[in-house]
Amino acid sequence: MELRYSPTCGTNWVRANILVNDGANTVTKGIRRMSSQPDGNGGWLGYFEQYEPDPAVGSSYGMQVYAPGTTCVDVSAVVRAPSGAVIASTNRPDNPWFTFC
């Protein structure tokens, strides 16, 4: 999995590189960043998240999320069989997301 960034438009997106091609399987890429809307208590209103499912063949790109400059983003990916069973995942027991700033 790769995290891509465009300085021109200030967006990030995920690219999953599938090494075992099987169009029956599905890869879902996730990307999120903290919301830019205040919650009124000094924090933010959760996350802005995007998910993109595709057949697990070759390179698979996720949706773009606006996160300019050093804005932190979290990313994840999971490959599932037609039955829904997880074949591969970036998930960890304590946190399914990896953070990049």
Image: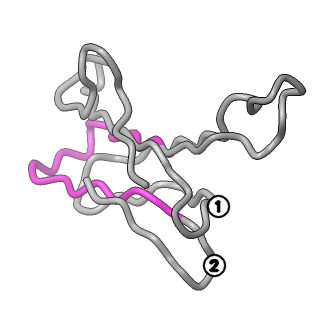
Residue 43, given in percent of the width and then of the height, sits at: 74, 29
- Residue placed furthest toward the right: 40
* Element type at mark 2: loop
The residue sitting at the left extreme is: 20
Q: Say whether residue 19 is magenta.
A: yes
Q: Residue furthest bottom?
A: 8
Residue at 60% x, 60% y is 67
- The residue singled out by tag 2 in the image is 9
Q: Which residues are magenta?
A: 12-30
Main SS, magenta residues: strand
The location of residue 91, given as percent across then percent down, is 27, 26
Element type at marker 1? Answer: strand
Label 2: few (<14), some (14–19) or many (≥20) C-alpha neighbours in 10 Å: few
Q: Quadrant of residue 10?
A: bottom right
Q: Does residue 45 lie above or below 14 as drawn?
A: above
Q: Is residue 15 above or below residue 37?
A: below
Q: Which residue is mark 1?
A: 66
Image quadrant of residue 25? top left
